[in-house]
Amino acid sequence: MLKNIPAILSPELLKVLCEMGHSDRLVIADGNFPAESIGKNAIVIRADGHSATAMLDAILTVFPLDTYVEKPVNLMQVMPGDKVETPIWDEYKAIIAKHDERGADTVGDIERFEFYRQAREAYAIIATSEKALYANVMLQKGVI
């Protein structure tokens, strides 16, 4: 056991977060995201039973966001014509504001298929059981 480390961060996940370097990307994926097929060249970590919001909050306790890019956090845009509400995005922004003084200014969005393309280049993908739609979020690691 370690002190001050959120219990949701498994030893495997902590190792991966520590291995990541400046500008490496991490995807926190919702339950519908094709983590295994998109993550063929990445480390895929299962976080079954956990929400994306809980995972984001825990990760940001130990993970610095990149300060050298305008938007180190990116969400998957809703496809035109989809009638989907995304209240989880507001939750994400509140969580980010807890951990980074730039708050919502760190958050951008990426068209769905471009998000998939960029996710294929991510260092790691965390597959959560998040049920919210369009709840995928990509983080770019900064320096301490």
Image (cartoon, grey):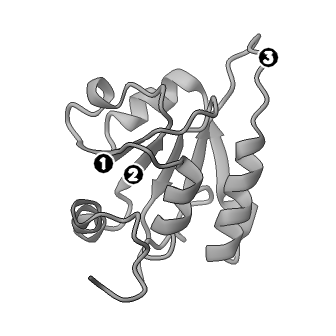
Distance in Å between CA atoms under marks 2 and 3: 27 Å
Which mark is nearer the camera, 2 or 3? 3
Which residue lies under the disc numbered 3?
A: 83
Residue shown at 47%/73% (left/top)?
A: 64
- Residue type, mark 2 in image: Leu
Q: Position of residue 127 (x, y in %)?
A: 38, 40
- Residue type, mark 1 in image: Ala
Q: Is residue 36 above or below residue 91?
A: above
Q: Residues within 10 Å of mark 3 (few under 14, many from 20)?
A: few
Which residue lies under the disc numbered 2?
A: 26
Looking at this view, is 114 or 92 the one in front? 92
Using residue 1 as the reference point, say whether residue 135 is left or right of it. right
Q: Residues within 10 Å of mark 1 (few under 14, many from 20)?
A: many
Residue shown at 40%/79% (left/top)?
A: 5
Farthest residue to the top: give it. Answer: 81
* Tag 2 and tag 1, C-beta contact below 8 Å: yes
The quarter of the picture where the N terminus appears is bottom left
Q: Residues within 10 Å of mark 2 (few under 14, many from 20)?
A: many
Which residue lies under the disc numbered 1?
A: 124
Q: Position of residue 120 (x, y in %)?
A: 33, 33
* Tag 2 and tag 3, C-beta contact below 8 Å: no
Residue shown at 38%/25% (left/top)?
A: 34
Counting labels gives 3
- Residue type, mark 3 in image: Lys
Using residue 89 as the reference point, say whether residue 112 is left or right of it. left
| Circle nearer the N terminus (2, 1) | 2
Distance in Å between CA atoms under marks 1 and 3: 30 Å
| Circle nearer the N terminus (2, 3) | 2
The quarter of the picture where the C terminus appears is bottom left
